[in-house]
Amino acid sequence: MLRLEKRPQPSKLWTALTPLLAVLATMVAGGLLFALLGKNPVEAIRVIFFDPLFNEQVASYARPQLLVKAGPLILIAIGLSFGFRAGIWNIGAEGQYIMGAICGAAVGLAFYPSENPLIFPLMVMAGALGGWIWAMIPAILKITFRTNEILVSLLLVYVAEQLLASVSLGLLRNPEGGGFPGSRNLASWDASSNPELIAGTGMHWGVVAAFISVIFAYVMLSRHIFGVQLQLAGQAPRAARFAGVRPEMMVFICFTASGVLAGLAGLFEVTGPAGQISIDFNVGYGFTAIIVAFLGRLHPIGILLAGLLMALTYIGGELAQFMLGLPAAAIQAFQGMLLFFLLAFDMLSNYRFRLSAREAA
Amino acid sequence: MSVELLLTALMIASTPILLAAIGELVVEKSGVLNLGVEGMMITGAICGFAVAVETGSPALGFIGAALGGAAMSMIFGVLTQFLLSNQVATGLALTLFGLGFSALIGQGYVGQVPPSTPKLDLGPLSDIPFLGPVLLSHDLVVYLGLALVAGVWAWLRYSRGGMILRAVGENHDAAHALGYKVIRIRLAAIAFGGACAGLGGAYLSLVRVPQWTEGMTAGAGWIALALVVFASWKPWRVLIGAWLFGGITVLQLNLQAAGVKVPVELLSMSPYLITILVLVIISSDRRRANLNAPAALGRIFHAAS
């Protein structure tokens, strides 16, 4: 009879294969879902996964968007992956992303209309600080009171959204905006704008930061003792303590990494692609980044690829919206499904099937 | 604002999270941490709404919501119990998927008005001053919520089934060794939790709001999760917590309506802030916080033989 046996170590082969399997399975299941919605499944999958890259008519718009959308996803997911490795669950990156954007924008707007070149670097620092402070709330509560960081970080997203509504209607509202909610356009003010660095690629400072974070994370995880400590804290907390890993320090470092990177992502987004602080400027990158982190196996290179793939589904989803009339929500369900399949197939890397004769009782 | 109206509104406002939280309490008592409450709630909200609008019957709507929530929870059940996936990650996936999936089904239902849910009519009893409007003139779901609290409490405490469920939640290996079907029991608990979350969601879309909008649960599922921690896994404390939270929600809404000189956003964020505050207070007392937590909570069960 078939028996499930835990592997002594996760299989390297299956760990690398499962994301691919999950993507394939999601395409099939997503196709079924689209068929139920009355769309041609093959065409829908083609529009989502291939047209943004290979269809001549839309590629000139879609290709640069790939980096624009992947940038924040990768940046946030890299930060989250540290904590997820150690069993520290910051799921409120969306809130830290919003706070980074608000703080950065506020600092920049305080100097309006100066054209001092130091304004943008200052805004970047303020953005990182904003995300960090927001992440420190659940971290410090966990360290001092052992409060569940999952719930606190998530609940703070709703608080951040209220703050965002408040500042875009009040404190940061464009005084020349005719009373409409939303701040001045940061992208069109030279001192604060985060422009496309190489025309036609979608490359902006946020994407640069994302690439740097990937390299940095790779070095930290594979060449530094910190990577080992993280792994240890996640898989054997008691052993980690004997090895001199302080759990409080781990919580602090992981939340710092994710808060700072999410804050940066928010700042780069608000000064570039989004352009201004507005009530609905956040589009859920903080949550999608959770999927990116898992899909990338919590590994920096994996996250890089997963971020690009997720960005592709965003662009493809938009494309499918106006080409096939596929509802916007379909793509969100699609992304959720991807995570399900990934988690399901993960069993193959941690367990193996063994044929065994039924033992006599 | 009279106390009478305030308390009446409190009973309504606390029902969705009460239902979701009592369901999650049973799930956690069985040793499973399902973070997908928000996803199951919003699925229940749209399933209930759709069924009620199509059939014109709120009762069928609530049944549909319970089934929808339970079906959703079974995705989590299969993944965590058979495929042994990480419960935190799977719960998150359930929430992300539920939000997208519900928005997808709900497209045609935006702006529609659901059939109104009838209120209990006890004749002269409902006319008793104060007690009548506050306690005796709600719809049946409010009483269902209260009955579930009492039922779950009694079942966990006095019945054999409840004892087995708690045993599974405390030590699944020992329970397995005694011959209890750990996975089957947990699946049943997860389905119950899903159904309760679905009912809670439908109460939002059919009675409380009543309308369908994307993402309308707005964190209610997460607050329900926090409530279970707040209650130290005790059913009656879930009720107290739900009332406390319902009271804050009603109070802040009334303050907004009254135009008090406090920023609207500050009032809107107060339920979340107070939930965090309560969590901190509960968790700061180490002994009390861990006293009732099921020992096997969130741990993966894989029978060695």
Image (cartoon, coloured by chain):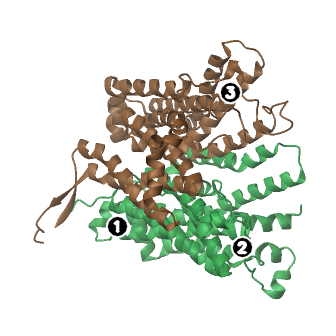
Chain colours: A brown, B green
SS of the residue at dot 3?
A: loop
- The subunit carrying tag 3 is A
Question: Which residue is identified by label 2?
Answer: B114
Quadrant (top left/top right/bottom left/bottom right) for the N terminus of chain B: bottom right
Choose between B100 and A249: the one closer to the eye.
B100
Choose between A99 and B167: the one closer to the eye.
A99
How many callouts does the rendering have? 3
A303 up-or-down from A128: above or below: below
Q: CA distance from mark 1 to mark 2?
A: 40 Å
Question: Which residue is identified by label 3?
Answer: A187
- Residue A61 lies, in percent from the top left, at 55, 37
SS of the residue at dot 2?
A: loop
SS of the residue at dot 1?
A: helix
Q: Is residue B14 visible?
A: yes
Of marks 3 and 1, the one in the foreground: 3
Of marks 1 and 2, the one in the foreground: 2
- Residue A341 lies, in percent from the top left, at 38, 55
Share a chain, discs 3 and 1?
Answer: no
- The subunit carrying tag 1 is B
If you read the primary sequence from the N terminus, does the residue marked by circle 1 or circle 2 appear first?
2
In this rendering, position of residue B285 left or right of residue A16: right
Q: Amino acid at mark 3?
A: Ala
Q: Tell me where residue A330 sits by quadrant.
A: bottom right
Q: Amino acid at mark 2?
A: Pro
- Residue A67 lies, in percent from the top left, at 50, 33
- The subunit carrying tag 2 is B
Q: Amino acid at mark 1?
A: Val
Of marks 2 and 3, the one in the foreground: 3
Question: Which residue is identified by label 1?
Answer: B182
B22 up-or-down from A137: above or below: below
- Which numbered marker is on residue B8? none
